[in-house]
Amino acid sequence: MSPTFSVYREISHLPAWYASLEISHSQEIYNQITLDLSASAGYYYSDDDDFSEIENPDSRYRTLHDGLITAGLTIPI
């Protein structure tokens, strides 16, 4: 298992934070061929009063922003 945690900070256009957590794993299945699996999720945290929730304009936009699950094969040539 290989976890990765990244944090990004936007400072000019829309002041905000974006955090991403990814977990990945590779498993050899046959003669150097590997099955590569990963899952990630990202969270967006706005610091800008002008970037708000549609339902509640007084609340800044802060939410789980994306998720991704991948599977792949690595086949050496």
Image (cartoon, helix red, strand yellow):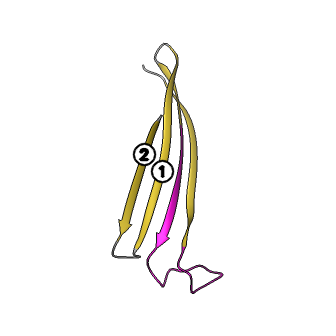
Quadrant where the image shows the C terminus: top left
Could you tell me how far apart the alpha carbons at marks 1 and 2 are, in whole angstroms? 6 Å
Q: Amino acid at mark 2?
A: Thr
Q: Residue at x 46, y 17 (%)?
A: 32
Q: Which residue is mark 1?
A: 21
Image coords of residue 2 (percent x, y):
44, 37
Name the element at disc 2. Answer: strand
Number of numbered callouts drawn: 2
- Callout 2: 10 Å neighbours few (<14), some, many (20+)? few
The correct choice, above or below, for 68 with respect to 35 in the image is: below
Q: Residue at x 50, y 42 (%)?
A: 23
Q: Residue furthest left?
A: 12
Q: Amino acid at mark 1?
A: Leu
Q: Would residue 57 be found to the left or right of residue 74 on screen?
A: right
Give residue 77's mark: none
Q: Residue at x 44, y 63 (%)?
A: 18
Q: Are marks 1 and 2 in contact (CB under 8 Å)?
A: yes
The correct choice, above or below, for 77 with respect to 13 in the image is: above
Image coords of residue 31 (percent x, y):
48, 13
Q: Residue furthest right?
A: 55
Q: Which residue is mark 2?
A: 4
The correct choice, above or below, for 68 with respect to 75 in the image is: below
Image coords of residue 50 (percent x, y):
48, 84
State which quadrant residue 66 falls in.
bottom right
Image coords of residue 39 (percent x, y):
55, 44
The correct choice, above or below, for 69 with respect to 8 in the image is: above
Magenta-colored span: 38-61
Precedes in sequence: disc 1 or disc 2? 2
Name the element at disc 1. Answer: strand
